[in-house]
Image (cartoon, rainbow, N blue to C red):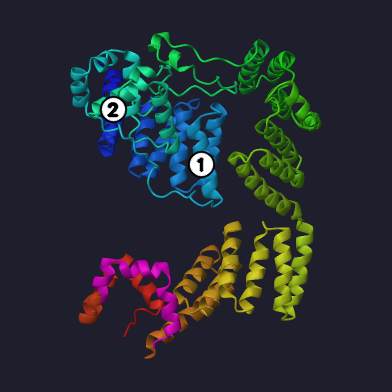
Amino acid sequence: MSDKEKAAAAKALGNAAFTAKSYAEAVEHFTEAIRLDPSDHVFFSNRSACRASLEEYEQALEDGAECVRLKPDWPKGYTRKGLAEFFLKKYDDASETYKAGLKLAPNDPSLKEGLQKVMDAKYEVPGGKPSGASMPFSNPFGGLDPAGLTRASVSNPRIQEYLKDPEIMKKLNTVMGMSSGTGGEVQQKLLMDLLRQDRRVLEVLMAAQGIQMHCADDFASTRGPADDDSASNAKRPPVESDAKPPAKRQKSEDAAKPPSQAAAPVDPRTDNQREADDFKDQGNKLYKQRKFEEALAMYDKAIEKEPNDVTYYNNKCAVWIELGEKSYSKVLETCQDLIERRYEINTACAGGASFEKVAKVYARMASVYERQHQFDKAVEMYNKSLTEDNNRHVRTALRELERLKEKWEREQYVDPKLAEEHREKGNEFFKSNDFANAKLEYDEAVRRNPADARLFSNRAAALTKLLAYPDALRDLEECLRLDPKFVKAYSRKGAAHFLMKEYNKALAAYNKGLEIDKNNEECLKGREQVLSKIMETQQSDEVDEEQVRHAMADPEIQQILKDPKMRDFLRQLQENPMEAKQAMRSDDRLGEAVSKLMAAGIVRAR
């Protein structure tokens, strides 16, 4: 048996374990499959699903990313990667992942739902946050007992005939494989759609549960491909089309016929409309391939066949947007014309300018205004779109736009020259001890140039004088993020910690500054002052409660005190001080931790 065959066998075992919700066992089987054939993207996809079910999201993300790397044109991989990023609260990354997948499969329900959940969580929409589990849904048929099927086939000849049909068995396997999917409501919808399409599958499933379903032949069968990536065939569902839905179900006498004789659904479209939709579908495919001129030609043919349908014009506008700024005015003119003629179009062709279609026209106009940075106009168009059709995707786009507008306005406000003028004014106020006005000038300077580390350092100095030590420390952290070698920021940080009686942190700040410039006078003096204060507190009989409160609120100090080795040392320090000091000298890590506790006022050396 070749390695690929062994890998396929391991995958089959993994699928079985996954269906049985034995996720850890499934991971082992998929890991073996990957060892035998590391080039198969489906193995990584399936293992990612298992790890997500185990809430091991970091590993699930690694597998999802590898799946995408191996097969970048496979949408399911983006679903796996995006799900892991969602539960790791990497909302921006998850958003980009789902959007990349939707470029490949614009109508994929799992990708659409995933992106919506990410947007809801990112913007704190109630119910949008991840809740710890990998969004499983409960499939009542997931734990189906094969023995139940056998018993049902013996007692019911019709079930026996169904089990001989490969198409029914394929659908049955798909249903059983949905027991632990990560698609949530979408997965449940897929299950219900499948059962509605072929009631024979529902009859088999219910018979296996010991429930006899009468008149099962009253329902016609509609064949449809199964999507079972997490089970066996790893095929994705077909992309939905924009074609008009079929007419109502046939009369009961047609439905009562056997599946093979059931009448086909009635298509209410005229011949011209069918041809127009065919041209539109061809145009959509060309659009996805970025063959824009060819796509425009197809949409023109669709309009020629059916000139009274907004969709074809709106699709042309999508192509024009891709062609760049020179076409934006044409998009706006076309969309405005469609809106003005909407009632005329609807009169000529019922539904040709429905509320939903007009809503998409407004959304198209909003996207153009957004690209032109006319954000107020874009917001207006999105709101008009929501008036026509309260669509959640448009709501998400509107929230994104409002944040983009805020960011863009911030960026437009940046002016380094004006920032320097405000910094100099702030320096003048600072020298005259007018710290409040100095801070106001530094505030404006920061808004004008938020990339200048000096401005945050200067504002921190003013805040320190105003006794706003926590605010000063936040500015100094930002300053050091922008310029990690800014020694002045370390000296000011040490001073702020010293004034807050956080002597251990003050000492650490001064030491970091001296690592950059060992001769820096401010850091040297600051460190000497801190060491002197630590020595003073060690020799004092009084406990500085404020210092201890600050220390006990420090996560680093809390972590040190939780260490079992430290607890043993502190107990030993009370019972046998000499032995404890010897242990501290022989263990550098312990000695460093004790020094921090001494600087924080928790431990005293006598």
Q: Give the residue displayed 40% in from the left and 9% down from the top.
A: 260
Range of residues picked out in magenta: 543-570
Q: Callout 1, which amino acid?
A: Ala
Q: Residue 104: in sight, yes or no?
A: yes
Position of the C terminus by quadrant: bottom left
Does the magenta run of residues contain 559? Answer: yes
Q: Nearer the viewer, residue 413 or 218?
A: 218
Q: Callout 2, which amino acid?
A: Met
Q: Residue 37: in sight, yes or no?
A: no
- Residue 94: numbered disc: 1
Q: Which structural element holds mark 1? A: helix
* Quarter holding residue 44: top left
Position of the N terminus by quadrant: top left
- Left or right relative to 606: residue 75: right
Residue 358 in the image: state x and y as whole percent: 70, 32
Query: Which residue, given by chain and number where applicable, does mark 2 sit on?
Result: 206
Q: Is residue 580 above or below residue 44?
A: below
> Distance between the Cα atoms at labels 2 and 1?
39 Å
- Left or right relative to 502: residue 60: left
Q: In this view, does 200 lie above or below 90?
A: above
Q: Give the residue displayed 74% in from the left and 67% down from the top.
A: 423
Q: How crowded is mark 1: few (under 14 residues within 10 Å), some or many (20 or more)?
A: many
